[in-house]
Amino acid sequence: MQADKVVRSTCPYCGVGCQVALHIKDDRIFRIEAPVEAAPNYGRLCVKGRFGADYVHHPNRLRLPLVRRRPQRPGRRTPARFPDDWREATWDEALNFAAQGLARIHRAAGPQAITANACAKATNEDNYLHQKLMRGVLGTNNVDHCARLCHAGSVTGLQLALGSSAMSNSIAEMPDLDCFIVTGSNTTETHPVISTFLKQAVTRNGANLIVIDPRQTEMTRFARLWLRHKPGTDVALFNALAHVIVTEKLYNNAFIAGRTAGFAEYAASLELKTPEWAEIITGAPADDIRRAARMVATARRAAIYWGMGISQSTHGTDNTLTLTNLALLTGHIGRPGTGLNPLRGQNNVQGCSDAWGLPNVLTAYQPVAGAAVRAKFERDWFGPDDDRRLPAQAGLTTTEMVDGILSGIVKGWYVMGENPLMSEPNLRHAQHAVEHLEFFVAQDIFFNETNVYADVILPAAAFAEKEGTFTNTDRRVQRVRKAVAAPGQARADWQIICGLAVRIEAELNRPTLGWQYARPAEIWEEMRRLTPDFGGINYDRLEREGGVHWPCPTADHPGTPYLFADSFPAGRGKFFAVEFNTASELPDADYPFILSTGRVLYHWHGGTMTRPSALNEIWPEATVELHPRDAARLNLTTGDWLDLSSRRGTITARLLVTGRSPEGTVFIPFHFAEAAANILTDNRLDRRAKIPDYKVCGVKIEKAAVIPAARPGAEIPLEDRGAIKDVSGLK
Ligand SMILES: Nc1nc2c(c(=O)[nH]1)N[C@H]1C(S)=C(S)[C@@H](COP(=O)(O)OP(=O)(O)OC[C@H]3O[C@@H](n4cnc5c(=O)[nH]c(N)nc54)[C@H](O)[C@@H]3O)O[C@H]1N2
Ligand SMILES: Nc1nc2c(c(=O)[nH]1)N[C@H]1C(S)=C(S)[C@@H](COP(=O)(O)OP(=O)(O)OC[C@H]3O[C@@H](n4cnc5c(=O)[nH]c(N)nc54)[C@H](O)[C@@H]3O)O[C@H]1N2
Ligand code: SF4
Ligand SMILES: [Mo]
């Protein structure tokens, strides 16, 4: 088919930020290719980038603003069905209704009674305005987003040790790696194009890959060493690696003396943490721990890549600190091919955090507590003679918002493009909280499990229907371009926010902050003038160069592909002595298995975007992975229907017997509403990062009492589903 036009944009799924060429015919995307000359993917795409953007044209897209037919009362709020409980409204009506509801709460209970979720799928410009509305008009820092459920453990640990939390090196360095650790990351399924560069380092460059993961991911097939430890035991394992490096004097003396602090105390804390001690706790053989330690310490350059297996834990911060310790000890940071690299998940989770979708910082991590920083924003927005002030106190995190609703502090909620009633832990608890809201505004491209509780839904344009920028996992700011028209009356998020903001200002009798942007480039310009790290990036330059890595303070600055060449933002990098401990819910006699949750290649989070996609045909239902020895003991086989229960609830799904998960652990993807893994998970938190533990809680398994009705596609034999490869025996 001949395209009417081909539009260059950025993939809407994961943080790799692949560049895509959208082929358009009759206002529809009919093919997606990748330009071979463009970083970061150079012609590569995974199945979601190539075939998964069909959700854009799905008939279920929200087309018109919707308002509830009946008012909802706190404590009695219910999910609504279309069209019975909704009526279509004009934009004017819906925006007025939303503004009046939020203003009513603001007047009655103050700014802290309103909270908002920013959107890691929307653009930097969308998110900047969302925060400007919350902070500048409503006067609250109660803004957070899915980064809390994601890399919060990594961010907190990296901030403590280095004073910066971004990934320190770039994707471009990956094919040339010498030695690297991949831990708690199922890279081939979750950052597929990055995984191809990492595999290339092994197959073409002979790099030493060490995988540290309880689950047999495909990356283990490329590993020189695979340490299969028990879930939740990373602190013990990484402490033992450090013990070997210290006792065998393999550490980097010059780096430690020149760039770090706290080494002596830290080294003393490692004395008893021998590989034999760690083997008892982790199950990983002491000899392998020694080999891994020597491999990393003696490499010319070594890098660490990690994902949710490290971060999503009641001790996610401690886990991360053991990784920063290792990098500081060996001096493998601040040079190409080294570094500490948390692989960021959502297409724009880096950008949503940079654009201040967090409760304690303004753009690019300028602290809200800093008076000078606030004064800069106050002058720019309110003008020099205005006495309005920005709130100085940090706001609530997403996990605290849920408890805030139940304790009566929070009454109003504005969710832009998130689905907490699939993604929060302990869903019954989160659902109970949502039922108690006084007023709820949602803004999305689809109905999802959360926004059906809202009073008003504002229909948003999807990535291919708007202009803007996303920032990928290695801090590269890249363009998103309008290729097709939005369905019905759906509008870009930034336009919706401008309409809402002026109405709230009118309701609250505030002088307006403007909101007269003609195009996203003007929003970027405003953010840039308030954010030194973005100073050298503008749309013209993005047009010419394709993408720029921030920090980039001036127009002649080349951008920063790797961080910390000369110093850390905190000055010296700090060692932290960390003890192995856990606050997670461990298995016991009643709930004898560990539940680990995560992802499959073909689906995205709560499934809002991938279940309406053709991708759903490949993986149409939830699966429960169980080790063959456990299955034999319980007399179960692949395809059996199981009831899985934790102390919080029960779900029903089909069994897949495979050696990928270790004995005693079951793995479930959290993409399927009809068997939502988060009904089972626990909402206790890491005390510093406030991130829940999605990787360890206790569950029990029984044959299903009632077998659910068949769903389309479910007849594909489980063993034939694309990514399932039982690779046991290959190692
Ligand atoms: N297909 C697809 N890709 C995605 C997403 C998606 O929904 N679908 N989501 C995106 C997002 S937002 C994110 S954050 C990333 C997440 O990307 P990943 O972090 O790769 O995703 P998970 O499936 O959560 O896998 C985490 C890995 O941690 C391991 N693990 C479990 N427990 C432990 C432990 O105690 N210690 C260690 N070291 N490892 C453990 C698991 O076995 C698994 O291999 O993926 C992004 N990419
Ligand atoms: N059990 C378990 N739970 C987990 C995790 C886990 O590993 N295990 N991982 C956690 C992690 S790492 C993450 S990041 C979270 C993700 O949690 P969420 O962010 O809540 O999940 P998504 O499904 O990505 O929600 C994105 C929403 O944005 C909408 N959307 C897409 N594009 C746009 C747009 O342009 N504008 C607007 N307004 N909306 C848009 C989609 O329709 C969808 O409803 O889940 C967390 N929950
Ligand atoms: S690797 Fe990520 S960014 Fe690239 S095509 Fe796949 S989902 Fe999209
Ligand atoms: Mo994430």
Image (spheres, grey):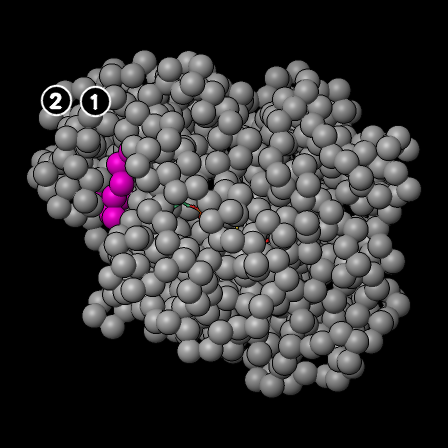
Instruction: Depth check: give the residue in front, 270 or 382.
Output: 270
Give the residue displayed 42% in from the left and 46% down from the top.
308
The amino acid on which the numbered mark 2 sits, given as a three-letter code, is Glu
- In the rendered image, residue 127, in percent from the top left (x then y), is placed at 67, 48
Residue found at x 69% / y 27%: 34
On residue 37, the disc is none
Dividing the picture into quadrants, the one containing residue 93 is: bottom right
Q: Quadrant of the C terminus?
A: top left
Q: Quadrant of the N terminus?
A: top right
In this view, the residue in front, 27 or 90, is 27
Residue 234 is one of the magenta-drawn residues: yes
Q: Residues within 10 Å of mark 1 (few under 14, many from 20)?
A: some
State which quadrant residue 578 falls in.
Answer: top left
Contact between marks 2 and 1 (CB within 8 A): the answer is: yes
- Is 537 placed left or right of 572 in the picture? right
Number of marks in the rendered image: 2
In the image, residue 549 lies in the stretch drawn in magenta: no
What residue is drawn where x is 73% and y is 57%?
445
N-term-proximal mark, 2 vs 1 = 2
x and y percentages locating residue 275 in the rendered image: 13, 36
Q: Give 664 or 509, whichever is nearer the viewer.
A: 664
Whether label 1 lies within 8 Å of ligand 1 gets the answer no
Q: Which residues are magenta?
A: 226-236
Q: Cβ of disc 2 within 8 Å of ligand 1? A: no
Question: Which residue is at the front of the view, 523 or 531?
Answer: 523
Of helix, strand and loop, which one carries label 2?
loop
Residue position for label 1: 294
Task: Reply above or below: 289 against 298.
Answer: below
**Which residue is label 2 attached to?**
248
Q: Left of 604 or right of it: where is 99?
A: right
